[in-house]
Amino acid sequence: MAPAHRHDGPLPPVGAQALYENAMWADAVVRCAGAGNDGTGAPRPLTAQPLRDRPGALLHGSCDLGTRPILAAALGVVTRIPGPVVHLDLSGVAFLDAAAVAALVRANATVRGQGRRLLLHHPPYSLRKVVEMFPDECAALEVAA
């Protein structure tokens, strides 16, 4: 059986600073092969790539039951990226289910617990709808203007 996800490139070294500065990791893309679906039957994997212009990551795909493990892995990396502000670009995310939004809330709490900020960019409609349904639980999420 194939693993649920794989790493294109070497695993990042242990330690937040080395994690983000390692050029091999900067080009790594984490994928969940065959996970997700866009309604046509075609797989829609979730990918996460480090941003090149600021500390953070860019997500592409769908965040749902099928991609939950890869989202957890990607957010685990994001919370260890050094810097006072960590950026999470969601412009390539088509859908976030409620569990994915809860994972964002947990990642935000982790980063805030370190005295830093997690700044979300280009949230999809589904994130805004979950925030409307659970305003108290999602109040700490910070979206870039």
Image (cartoon, helix red, strand yellow):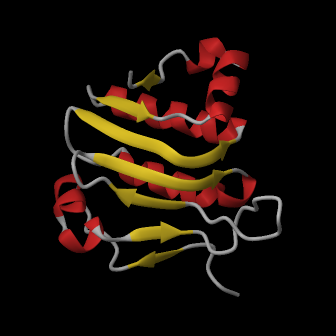
Residue shown at 61% from the left, 59% from the top: 69
| Viewer-closest of 120 and 6 | 120
Quadrant showing the N terminus: bottom right
| Residue that protrudes farthest toward the bottom in the picture | 1
The quarter of the picture where residue 61 lies is bottom right
Residue shown at 28% from the left, 31% from the top: 114
Coordinates of residue 126 in the picture (x, y in percent): 68, 34
Q: Is residue 88 above or below residue 74?
A: above
Coordinates of residue 66 in the picture (x, y in percent): 72, 60
Q: Is residue 49 above or below residue 140?
A: below
Coordinates of residue 25 in the picture (x, y in percent): 28, 69
Q: Going by the image, does 13 lie left or right of 6?
A: left
| Residue that protrudes farthest toward the front in the picture | 40
Residue shown at 48% from the left, 35% from the top: 122
Q: Is residue 105 above or below residue 22?
A: above
How many badges with numbers are in the image? Answer: 0
Coordinates of residue 116 in the picture (x, y in percent): 27, 28
The quarter of the picture where residue 33 lies is bottom right
Q: Going by the image, does 31 lie left or right of 41?
A: left
Residue shown at 82% from the left, 59% from the top: 39
Quadrant showing the C terminus: top left
| Viewer-closest of 87 and 75 | 87
Q: Going by the image, does 18 lie left or right of 5?
A: left
| Viewer-closest of 145 and 127 | 145
